[in-house]
Image (cartoon, coloured by chain):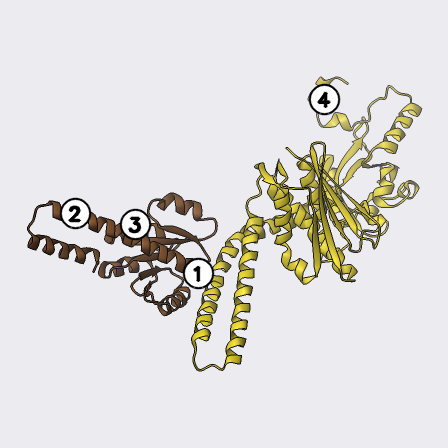
Amino acid sequence: MSEKADIKVLLVDDEETLLEYLSKRLLREGFTVKATFSGEEAVAVADENAFDVAVVDLKMPGMDGVETQKQLKKIQPYLQCIVLTGHGAIDTALESGRHEAFEYLLKPIEYDTLVGTIKKAYEQKTQVQNAKFREEVEDIYRSGRGARGIKKAIGKLRNIYGID
Amino acid sequence: MESTDHQQQPKEFPRELPESTLGPAAAGELLQCVLQNTNDLVFVTDADDIIVSVSKTAEEILGYEREKIRGQHPKELAGDSEEFERMTAVLFEEGTVNRSDFPFRHADGHLVYCDVSFVALKDAKGTSTGCVVIARDITEWKNFQEELIRVDRLAEVGRTVSGTVHEINNPLAVINEISGWMEVVVSDSEGLNEDDRADLKTSIAKLLEQASRCRNIARQMLGFVRDTGPSGDSFDLHELLKNSVSFIFPELKSKDVEVLFDLMEGPLQMHSEPRMLEQVFVNLLTNAIHAIDEKGDGAGSIQINTRLEETSVVISFVDNGTGIAPKDQKKIFELFYTTKPSGKGTGLGLPICRNIIHKLGGAIHVESAFWKGATFVVRIPLRR
């Protein structure tokens, strides 16, 4: 299970019992999971901790899924969002957040589909992030700093991107 | 009689007995002819309120022979004598009175609701010479109205179903998730003996299976109650038929009824109203299941055939249920006619099916030999 051990998942859904059991299952499979029960709570948590993938329910009281997703992306640009939508709401969901979400899943979700999608979203996240990291590393090399300066700048980047 | 006379004396003139241009005999004959042939219930009373003339239709509506009605007081035929008194008072005051649903009493005791109008007759001196009562039987219309209210209530249920089904999906998802969790725990638990583990795993698998069944039902419900406004759509009839069958799959399974498809090869594209047709198909299939269940000898089957005839498609639903008695065959498409026990059938299903099919430019009929099953044949134009 080591391949999943470092995937950090943020769950956002107002259906608390559902999240409770979903978290338990994901934790047992080796994901790092944080369950939040509203968009507001999710944004507050994301301010403090880095996540790879967020699973966001579209329909929630208060801040809805589309807005939550936007806010989360603002804080953590490489975070991938999986949006859960009810039957019939998918068109609105697509319209309002087409370019934002990694994937839309129809509720009620199949556990295996969700796990598969979380893994794919994680891959996407690391790819995008690594590409950006390499780009910036190359920028640093081109900047003509000395070896020491380069090492220091890259160390800084590693911290920003969370790459070891 | 010039029209200007009407305008000058709008109230009085029509109720006066006009000087007839016909001789008395010819006038009498004309009146008899009218009374013999009108579709309405018509009484004419004399100055003593005794019925002197009555239309032939009264026999049908009231169940008495004309001779028995003549010589009676109209009050004796009224189903609500108090209301009749009130109407008479108004008639006396104003010369005319109307009621949109006044009850008469049929010879066998039941009430016949009529749209009635009473007009007092006077001679040239203004002396009352009796009155004319014209009544039209509205029993069917009244039943229809009651049924409309019932249908409207059902429609309301339909409208709320979609919200309800969405709500049901949430707890279903929770049940699903908890079952999934239990599955994981049971698989990994070290303190369980293997028999118990196997038993628990089977039980949880069944839970998951049932939850998934609920989800399918919910999904199909949503498909069925989706707005059925007339939009017109291109679709594959064969797929629609299969969807209709899967919609009632739970019932088919519980009643052990087998569905056999004998369809033309490949998809059958047509342009019509898929949602409405689905409603018809589900209705016919449900009826077939009931007929098979009522017969109760097992081995129930429904065969669905499709074939093309010129520019129409002909779909047959052949079941091996009870069949339909010849006396019922003509009536099953009539509104409110039902052969099901009271409370079970509304007498609405087939009339609505027929309405839909007619609306789509098609036709529906039944072929059946009693106790040998029934075949409903639906013909629909390929393009609307």
SS of the residue under disc 4: helix
Query: Is B251 positioned to the left or the right of A67 in the image?
Result: right
The type of residue carrying mark 3 is: Lys
Check disc 2: other Cα within 10 Å, few if <14, some if 14-19, many if 20+. few
Q: Which residue, given by chain and number where applicable, does mark 2 sit on? A: A138
The type of residue carrying mark 2 is: Glu
Q: CA distance from mark 2 to mark 4?
A: 105 Å
Q: Looking at the image, which residue is at 48% across and 66% down?
A: B175
* Quadrant location, the C terminus of chain A: bottom left
Q: Looking at the image, which residue is at 84% across and 51% down?
A: B325
Q: Which residue, given by chain and number where applicable, does mark 1 sit on? A: A112
* Sequence-first disc among 3 and 1: 3
Q: Looking at the image, which residue is at 89% across and 25% down?
A: B27
Q: Measuring from the top left, give residue A18's x and y in whole percent.
A: 42, 64
Q: CA distance from mark 3 to mark 1?
A: 26 Å
The type of residue carrying mark 1 is: Asp
Answer yes or no: is residue A10 visible.
Answer: yes
Q: Measuring from the top left, give residue A38's x and y in whole percent.
A: 33, 59
The vertical placement of B190 against A5, above or below, is below
Q: Closer to the observer: label 2 or label 4? A: 2
Q: Which residue, given by chain and number where applicable, does mark 3 sit on? A: A70
Q: Which residue, given by chain and number where applicable, does mark 4 sit on? A: B6
Q: Measuring from the top left, give residue B369's x and y in whole percent.
A: 84, 50
Q: Are marks 3 and 4 on the same chain?
A: no
Q: Are marks 2 and 3 on the same chain?
A: yes
Answer yes or no: is residue A77 visible.
Answer: no
The type of residue carrying mark 4 is: His
SS of the residue under disc 2: helix
- Which chain is assigned yellow? B
The vertical placement of B239 against A155, above or below, is above
Q: CA distance from mark 2 to mark 1?
A: 39 Å
